[in-house]
Image (spheres, helix red, strand yellow):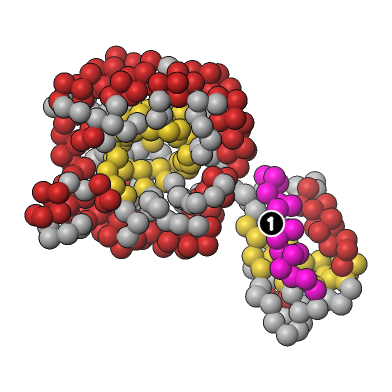
Amino acid sequence: MYRDHTKTVKIGDRVIGGGNPILIQSMTNTKTEDAAATAAQIHRLEAAGCEIIRCAVPTMEAAKALGEIKKQISIPLVADIHFDYRLAIAAIENGADKIRINPGNIGGADRVRAVVDAAKERGVPIRVGVNSGSLEKHLVEKYHGVTAEGIVESALDKVGMIEDCGYDNLVISIKSSDVLMCARAHEIIAEKTAYPLHVGITEAGTLLSGNIKSAIGLTLILSKGIGDTIRVSLTGDPVEEVKSAKLILRTLGLRKGGIEVVSCPTCGRTRIDLIALANQVEAMTADIPLDLKVAVMGCVVNGPGEAKEADIGIAGGVGEGLLVKKGQVVRKVPEKELVNVLREELLHWND
């Protein structure tokens, strides 16, 4: 598989590529200049399962704030730079574990070399990022539009700029909001380079549309053995990105651990507020470190049978529900006690 043979790259105390586990990334949406607020958000993301965090660095003040942020967090920090090569150098000097640049928009070869020299001096990897929305005019003309082939050519051209400076401590990201184009681009580039790939669908959208597009796109890419880190890009709280990324990896069998909650759709037999119940159970199980499947079923007619593949579950009734283990009814429970009883069972699962 591709990811088993990609080059290994060290980011802070984490290693990607070479068959190492796929790591989850997100990006802060606070003002990076506000170190306290940014660190607080990163703590929330860490708690949700984020393993690498990226921060925008639009100003010199933001670059200098990275040093203070780094003191307060425990996951690697990536500095996201556009246009000003001096910000990239300052970010490196202030402790960034990796920088994200597009070498095509930070100036001429001398400026690219200055950034590379700073990164080389401190062993900081560079993520070369290219988006379909910023594809160069000559490539649009060459391929008669924005295409997967054009995105790949642009990315490899930028990689070549850094390699010409004598540096190969690189990660590549090629992104598009067009899911199928993005997937095709990753298939092409995986055949052409051994650098680790950061994968995601850019500008995916809001919680609903963004999750659907990201799930489809990441499945198309990851299932082919491509991708070493991922980000689910959503318009909203970045914690939701991390939750979605974890679920995508777990669904594809690329990560284990954590409770998976399955629930049935509502129907005319439902006599319990199943939607609220399922949401309560999902929230309640988020902090329980078990590798289990928990079922939340809406009725006692088919619930126990439908839940037989789960380790444990509850099935609603009229004012009461059933506690079910491996499809077998254990006992009846008053409706208002269902979630608490389920939590107690989970907390004492290995007793």
- Vertical arrangement, residue 229 with respect to residue 271, above or below: above
In terms of depth relative to the viewer, which is nearer, 98 or 132? 132
Examine the image and state in which quarter residue 275 appears.
bottom right
Q: Is residue 282 left or right of residue 95?
A: right
Per the image, label 1 sits on a secondary structure element best described as helix
Is residue 15 among what the camera can see? Answer: no
- Drawn side of residue 334 relative to residue 7, left or right: right
Locate residue 279: give its quadrant.
bottom right
- Reply yes or no: does residue 51 show up in magenta: no
Q: Which residue: 33% across, 24% down?
A: 88
* Image mark count: 1
Residue at (46% x, 29% y) in the render: 77
- Whether residue 288 is in magenta: the answer is yes
Q: Is residue 68 above or below residue 310?
A: above
Amino acid bearing label 1: Glu
Q: Is residue 349 above or below residue 112?
A: below
Q: Badge 1, how many Cα within 10 Å: few under 14, some, many 20+?
A: some
Percent from the top left, x then y, of residue 320? Answer: 88, 71
Residue 303, x across and y down, in percent? 73, 76
According to the image, label 1 marks what residue? 282
Q: Which residues are magenta?
A: 272-289
Seen in the picture, residue 296 relative to 195 is either above or below; the reply is: below
Between residue 1 and residue 204, name the one nearer to us. Answer: 204
Residue furthest bottom as drawn: 268
Left/right of residue 153 with respect to residue 229 in the rendered view: left
| Residue 50 percent coordinates (x, y) | 53, 39
- When asked about the image quadrant of residue 90, the answer is top left
Name the residue: 69% across, 56% down.
Answer: 282
Q: Position of residue 29 (x, y in %)?
A: 51, 39
Q: Is residue 286 visible?
A: yes
Q: Is residue 191 left or right of residue 126?
A: left
